Amino acid sequence: MFTMKNKWILFSYSIPATNAKARMRTWRRISATGAAQLKTGLQILPNREDLLENITWLIGEVNALGGEAIALQCAQIEGMADQQIEQLFQTQIDPEFDQIQAEAKDLLATTDTLGDGGNVKELSAALRKLRKRCEAVRERDFFPSGAAAKTLNVLDSISERLRRPEQTDLPVARLDHSQYQGRIWVTRARPYIDRLGSAWLIQRFIDPQASFRFLRAGETVNLDQGDLAFDMAMGEFTHQGELITFEVLIRDFALHDPALAKMSELVKYIDVQEGALPDDANLLKTLLDGLIALTGDDHQLLERARLLFDALHAGYTKKVQRERT
């Protein structure tokens, strides 16, 4: 017997009109799932396990409030093609992306004044909030129309402008690579995202023959022997203003690589950890946490992390090339 896979969830509910607060709360909960209104009193969602679980909880809540609710799973909606239903979701979600784009473009215009003393810190915070909103909307973007990608491109363009050395209040240094070859680079033990990313950056783009030392409690940097400290207090390369160590190295050695620019954004998100992480940053953090849990030796951890950063750089390089063609 031929059966079609259920593609849609239909949800209908009613709550006594006397309970206005409960009606409003339920409506907000349904909106948060990303449901679209198919007809008056009838909501529709893609048939996904997580969404079905949310609707099941809502049914219980509505019943507890003295109302009635029902959910059905079906393969198709008679009288409406799947494409028409998908357009309902796009019509509902795309204006949210448009609003984020509009606010982002206003922010983009503001970045043009940075050279005249604009506030990088405030702009960076505003950008992070816009990205967080964008990621939240993407969770409900079940049938992408391209609006999300367009929005992310606008946000990326702001990030690139904020990274331009001439737009920061920090002194712009251009260091000679030849003076930083075959050196011993020193940082604190049990490195995390900024130290691991910086060590990878050093060996791949600054000092291919670099060796690394990880200081335990009580150990010190041998400055008289030419050791270079990074991501440490009083280190030659460490946080400066709003820049993390990874960004300072990119700036000081003029590493103008679009893939590195994208990577530095993820590293900064994880290092600063303000609010919810974007999907890419959250995945990188999860992988890195796993490597740390599996690896007790810092040198071995760095070796394993190098492969992770190499893959990330290669992936972003390929993505940038595709975007330019």
Image (cartoon, grey):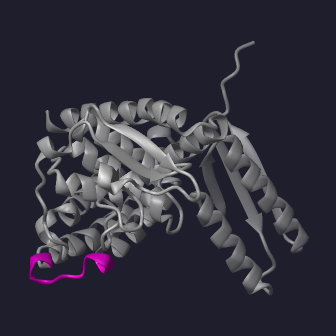
Quadrant in the picture for residue 31: bottom right
Q: Is residue 82 above or below residue 99?
A: above
Quadrant in the picture for residue 317: top left
Q: Is residue 198 above or below residue 151?
A: above
Q: Would you say residue 244 sits in the magenta stretch?
A: no
Q: Is residue 72 left or right of residue 77?
A: right
Tell me where residue 292 appears, x and y as whole percent: 60, 41
51 and 133: which is toward the camera: 133
Q: Is residue 308 left or right of residue 159?
A: right
257 and 306: which is toward the camera: 306
Tell me where residue 92 appears, x and y as whole percent: 45, 60
In the picture, the quarter occupied by the C terminus is top left
Q: Is residue 139 left or right of residue 145?
A: right
Asked if residue 143 shows in the view, the reply is no
Quadrant in the picture for residue 218: bottom right
Residue at left offset 70%, top offset 76%:
25
In the picture, the quarter occupied by the N terminus is top right
Prevailing secondary structure of the magenta residues: helix
Residue at left offset 24%, top offset 38%:
207
200 and 41: which is toward the camera: 200
Range of magenta residues: 114-122
Asked if residue 153 shows in the view, the reply is yes
Residue at left offset 25%, top offset 76%:
120
